[in-house]
Image (cartoon, rainbow, N blue to C red):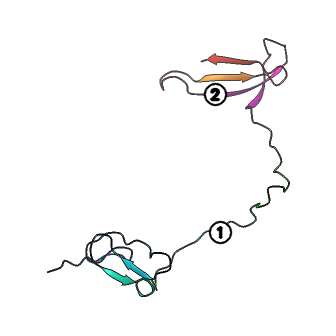
Amino acid sequence: MDEVYCASKEFCPRCGTILPFPIKGSVMISCRNCSYETDAREEFKNVVYHTHIHVNTRKNPTAAAEPVTKKDYGTLIERTCVKCGHDKLHFHTRQTRSADEGQTVFYYCPECKHQEIEYS
């Protein structure tokens, strides 16, 4: 006696295997694991699939490029650069060592491009 599974329409009701899409030009779906075969038009007539369409995407490579955004170097603070003496530096922090140790602070001078690192 064949065992029958109670499954979603995307699965074979005989063996539970995922049913493949029909071969191009055909409407028949054949299970790859057993001899089950069905007409896709009947099997999937009430199944709804969603499709996402991207609108307003640029297809023309000669179209104007997006404006270049300025790179974010971090917050600007009042701190003097040791190399050029500029009075404002950008900074950001990262956790570069183990969690029980302090963060590493990275400074960047917008004037001379000098970088400093402070382990806190």
Q: Quadrant of residue 54?
A: bottom right
**Residue shown at 55% from the left, 73% from the top:** 50
Location of residue 4 in the rendering, given as x and y in whole percent from the top left corner: 23, 79
Which residue was labeled with disc 2? 93
Horizontal side of 44 relative to 68 (left or right) equals left
Q: Amino acid at mark 2?
A: Thr
**Residue shown at 65% from the left, 69% from the top:** 53
Q: Who is closer to the viewer here, 77 or 14?
A: 14
- Label for residue 53? 1
State how far apart marks 1 and 2 are (Cα): 39 Å
Location of residue 93 in the rendering, given as x and y in whole percent from the top left corner: 64, 28
**Residue shown at 78% from the left, 11% from the top:** 82
What residue occupies the far bottom of the structure in this picture? 42
Q: Secondary structure at mark 1?
A: loop
Magenta span: 73-102
Location of residue 72 in the rendering, given as x and y in whole percent from the top left corner: 75, 36
Q: Secondary structure at mark 2?
A: strand
